[in-house]
Image (spheres, coloured by chain):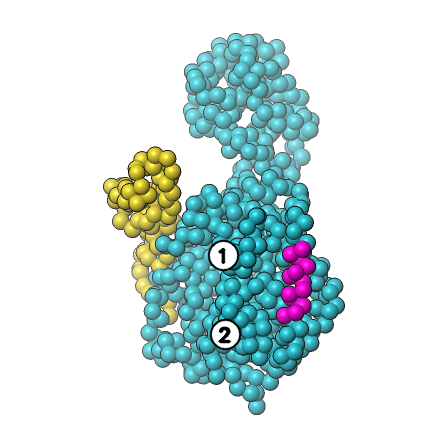
Amino acid sequence: MGEKLGGVPAQGDGEMSAPSCRPKKVMMVPLDPVHDVGLKLIRRALSERGHEVVLLPPDLAPEEVVQKAEEIRPDCLLVSRTISYGTAELLARFLDLLDAAGLRDKMKVAVGGMSIRPELAQEMGFDAGFGPDATVEDAVAFVEDREFRGARARRRLSKPDLTSGFSYKFKDEEIGGLCHGIARELLSWARERTSPGVLRAEIREEMEKARAEGRLDEVSKLREEYARLTGDEILRFYREGTPVSHTRPLTASETRAFSDLEKRAGDGEDVVRPASADVMANRVVFVQYGTGCPLMDGYHILLSQSWGARGVVHFDPSWGARQEGLLEGAWSHQHDGTVITLENLKLIKKSVLPWTLWQVRAHRGLNTPETVVLAALAGADLTKVNMVYGSLAAGTDPERLCVDGVKCLELAARFGLPYDVVTNEELAGVPAAKAFAGMLVVMTAGILTGGRPILQPLFAHSPEAIIGGIMDEDFVDFNAAKIMVLRDIVDAPIWPGAPVGFLTQSQDRAQSSTMTALHAALALGLGAQAVTIASSDEAYAGGPIAGGSRVDSLKSVAAALRFFGKTKITPSPRAAALREKLREDILNTLKSAAAAGSFVGALYAGVFGSREDGAYPGRAGRGTVTKRS
Amino acid sequence: MSKARDRVLDALDVETFLLCDTREEGMELGLALMKELGFDDVDVVFCEQGGPGVRIRLRAYLSRPGSDYPWTGQYDAGEAKIGG
């Protein structure tokens, strides 16, 4: 059920409870020249529930309807009115006639239809009015004398596990063998080394444990130790309490506002959900948040979940990846990205519903291992790791990020946090095959450390595709080839991102939402476990993403999923050729990396993305790696 | 929470079709329209010329992240900084 009576029927998975009342006699009639499909939907539902339903033909005069009501003597009379011309006069006259016939008090009378405003119907004297947003359940509940809360109906979903059922076995043994060899070398190299990022993660974990156990002297000692490992601005914060630029502490009123937010979220079951979101219930669609302010984020998260998001991704400021050390406390940031602190994360968590997957990303900077620690302590469900992207397209020194990244993999495994291995270096110009080769090595390292990685191919109009004309004809084949080749290679979960449709969206919200929706439907139609989408503000750079723009793209994705249903999208034969080419290039990249004898060395040498491609080994954290004693 | 505009979470968008001869003129008119409506922090999100004018989407930020939010007014008693 869940069908809307006006507008577009929605697919729902909610079942109505069995009728608790005796079977009712119901008379239904359209006060229109033609039938209203809504009445037929209600008739079907009522009949299935054992009620006796008489549906009169359209185009009857009110006098004829009243005469029929005298003959049938129903318990309930449901009339509909679709056209708006003269509606108020017609309905008023109809009620007068019912009253004059002595029938008004002998039956419940409701009116519904596209031209009905519920509050007006009740003012006129109807027992209920159902407008364009009413559902079949609303009408059935009215007949059965039950309270129906429509979109407010309590609803509980379960939290998805994106990694469930995957063996992580390589189907392509040649590629699998190379990935295992390279990953083993990476792990043994990294385990002999450490960095300020690794040490801070260890201190943070100890510090939070000591804090939780009330050992405050220990906290103070560890905090000082931590501060000694931080960079200039962060050190000033720990030593002098100086805020980092463009940040300010959350005010007390903002912090108190979180209790209102928490109340609105509740246990999630009473959150108002538009009917359009029903179709999203069994699909995992992530949205990214990171307005800069944890409170604003909370509202964006809550509204996104209402419109069907099943996962949310924390975006932190780009400077957070370039500075040694993380802040403490609750902070608002006046630019993009919300500062990662345990306090901020715990506040944000209040808006995350029990069945929503919450990802805190740790993939690219100088604080990656500590971010995994904080994510776990705050109760996140997922993190994000990829040393290749972080060191070739996000400014961190490859050697440093490999040491920190391996620590991330180990921490994520210990905390039971699955993570995606992102390939956004494609946006810098790295060909997909090279990015995939790097992703597969990191995934293998993750498997070898006991983790649950998730492959994250980029669904985008990437520089490689633009320059090479690969997507000139459509946006389907190349994206489909990416999924196909990964499925050929390994039995692992796939979560395209991030967000899908990158560089296809314009500032026009209709075009942007449509592109997002089609990419999401394509990914999910090709069997991906999840997808990350943008808001309709994706291509607008003039200001922060607005909450309403998140609704735009979520509604568009819901519409696309409703449209395609279980239909599979079949790419053109070109996709198979692209898949073959991808496989060949992945293999060649891995062969070159294996020949280099060192994963880190291969990163510097441009094997996984060269300067010519647009990838530049980062410099942040260079020279900070030391051998473990 | 005395005014409806205090309930705007972050931004208020105005979408319309403006009659004009060029895209630039349309953008100027759009920004002028937002000023006439009483908004200060305004921008053009989207503007495309076609036929007799432009399809335009204008935005006024009533609350930017990190600013003071009017919708937290009910919690304002006993204001104090607690971060850091």
* Quadrant (top left, top right, bottom left, bottom right) of the N terminus of chain A: top right
A321 w.r.t. A500: above or below: below
Is residue A281 on the magenta stretch?
no
Chain to which mark 1 belongs: A
Q: Which residues are magenta?
A: A577-589
* Viewer-proximal residue among A406 and A56: A406
Amino acid beneath label 2: Pro
User: Residue A83: percent from the left, percent from the top?
Assistant: 48, 21
Residue at the spot 49% in from the left edge and 56% down from the top edge: A288
Judged left or right of residue A113, residue A181 is right
Is residue A579 on the magenta stretch?
yes
Judged left or right of residue A276, residue B72 is left
Residue at the spot 43% in from the left edge and 26% down from the top edge: A120
User: Residue A306: percent from the left, percent from the top?
Assistant: 51, 47
Residue ID for mark 2: A617
User: Residue A328: percent from the left, percent from the top?
Assistant: 42, 71
- Judge whether residue A97 can be spotted in this image: yes
* Chain B rendering hue: yellow
Residue at the spot 60% in from the left edge and 77% down from the top edge: A599
> Could you tell me which secondary element the residue under label 2 belongs to?
loop
Tell me which corner region of the image, top left, top right, bottom left or bottom right, holds residue A582. Answer: bottom right
Q: Please tell me the numbered disc located at residue A288.
A: 1
* Quadrant (top left, top right, bottom left, bottom right) of the C terminus of chain A: bottom right
